[in-house]
Image (cartoon, rainbow, N blue to C red):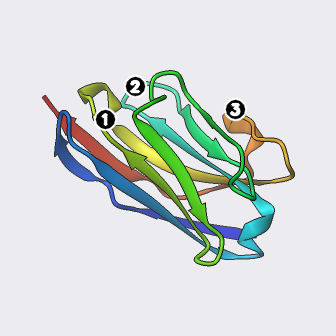
Amino acid sequence: QVQLVESGGGLVQAGGSLRLSCAASGRSFGNYVMGWFRQAPGKEREFVAVISWSGSSTRYADSVKGRFTISRDNAKSTVYLQMNSLKPEDTAVYYCAAKSGITIPVLVRNYDYWGQGTQVTVSS
């Protein structure tokens, strides 16, 4: 079992930056692939970014590529999402997710554990 707690969300103007954190507790964090997803009102949850257990491999949604960076610190059992050049369309609840194994998938159904989410609002 892994428990995930996100933090760092808030209100920011377009063009601004935020850094989200996801702290994990429970079984060995280093064994898990970690992902970030988001869900806007009235929309399905969508993939944002994923990072392998070692941090050597990452994937991004096309909509955030070049603006967002996912990273992890296994010693702190924490994964981060640095979000720059934020746009109003980035407004959503952002969720951290974890899965075991070595693949780095982009589908919601491939992840086993989820945090409660943190709200990010970008004003125009």
The amino acid at mark 3 is Leu
Location of mark 3 (residue): 107
For marks 3 and 1, the one nearer the N-term is 1
Location of mark 1 (residue): 91
**Mark 3 vs mark 1, CA separation in Å:** 20 Å
Which one is in front, 108 or 76?
A: 76
Kindly identify the residue that appears in the image at 86 percent across and 52 percent down. Answer: 101
Q: Element under label 1?
A: loop
**Mark 3 vs mark 2, CA separation in Å:** 18 Å
Which one is in front, 113 or 10?
A: 10
Which one is in front, 12 or 74?
A: 74
Location of mark 2 (residue): 42
For marks 3 and 2, the one nearer the N-term is 2
In the depicted structure, whether residue 115 falls above or below residue 122:
below
Please state if 59 lies on the left or on the right of 111 as rendered. left
In the depicted structure, whether residue 74 falls above or below residue 54:
below
- Percent coordinates x, y for residue 61 in the rendering: 55, 27
Which class describes the residues within 10 Å of circle 3: few (<14), some (14-19), or many (20+)? few
Q: Which residue appears farthest toward the right when viewing the image?
A: 101
- Percent coordinates x, y for residue 71 in the rendering: 55, 55
